[in-house]
Every structure is written in C-alpha cells, then in structure tokens.
Amino acid sequence: MPGTSKQSSLELKLERRERNIILCAKKRNFNVEVVVDEEDDMEERLDRFNRQIVRMGLFREWRRRRFYENAREKLKRKRREAALLRRRIRHVSTFNFSF
C-alpha cells in the first residue's frame, strides 16, 4: 500500500520498486525514502525503516540535535568521535585477511 507519513522531520515513502534507501540532507531536515515490495506487511516496512535509520546514524543525529550544543561540547564530541574512529581503524587493520 503506497503512502506517505511524516514523523519528526523524517519522511517515509513507501513505493513498489526495488528495496533501497535514498537520503537527502538539507540543514536540519532529513528525507529518507524506503522502497518496499507490495507483499511486505506494515511491520516489515517499519522494521526495515528503523534498521536503516539506525544504520545510517540518523537516530543518533536526531538525539544529538534535540538540544543546543555549545562550542566546547561540540569540540569534546568531535574528539570522542575521532578517537572512536581511530580505534575502529586500528582494530580493522590488525586482522590479516589472507586466504
């Protein structure tokens, strides 16, 4: 059942095509499109939408933007994110993928 519903500046569009996600970001608004099959029920559609939102980091971004973040807090957050990224890169680079 194709339709459109809006919820907290996230837009979910259900259409009959291949399953994919389209993300367009403008300032504070995110438009997310989830294309689903006709045979999918509403629970599957919502689960797919929620998984994609979490996977793309939009849920974390929404929670972060709920309140004003001053310059000091922003700098601390950026440092934490950079440290996390360095740890992830270090962890992935330690694996030997030779077969």
Image (spheres, rainbow, N blue to C red):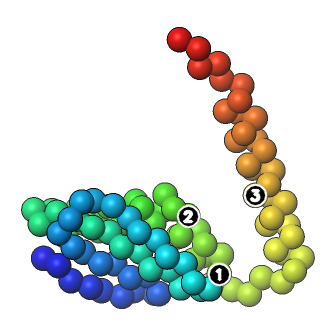
Identified by mark 2, the residue type is Gly
Q: State the residue at coordinates (69%, 86%).
A: 67
Question: Would you say 90 lies left or right of 6 here?
Answer: right
Dot 1 lies on which element? Answer: loop
Dot 3 lies on which element? Answer: helix
Which residue has dot 3 on it? Answer: 81
In the displayed structure, 40 sits above or below 96; it is below
Pointer 2 or 3: first along the chain: 2
Pointer 1 or 2: first along the chain: 2
Q: State the residue at coordinates (33%, 61%).
A: 20
Question: Would you say 59 lies left or right of 84 here?
Answer: left
Give 74 or 27, whichever is nearer the viewer: 27
Dot 2 lies on which element? Answer: loop
Give 28 or 45, whichever is nearer the viewer: 28
In the displayed structure, 81 sits above or below 95; it is below
Q: State the residue at coordinates (85%, 67%).
A: 76
As drawn, the residue found furthest toward the top would be 99
Labels 2 & 3 near each other (Cβ < 8 A): no
Residue 22 coordinates in the image, percent (x, y)? 41, 69
Pointer 1 or 3: first along the chain: 1
Question: Would you say 18 lies left or right of 25 here?
Answer: left
Say whether residue 50 is visible. no
Label 1 to label 2, Cα distance in Å?
Answer: 12 Å
Residue 3, quarter of the rendered image: bottom left
Q: Quadrant of the N terminus?
A: bottom left
Which residue has dot 2 on it? Answer: 57
Identified by mark 3, the residue type is Glu
Numbered tag placed on residue 65 in the rendering: 1
Residue 62, quarter of the rendered image: bottom right
Label 1 to label 3, Cα distance in Å?
Answer: 16 Å
Question: Would you say 28 lies left or right of 22 here?
Answer: right
Q: State the residue at coordinates (62%, 85%).
A: 27
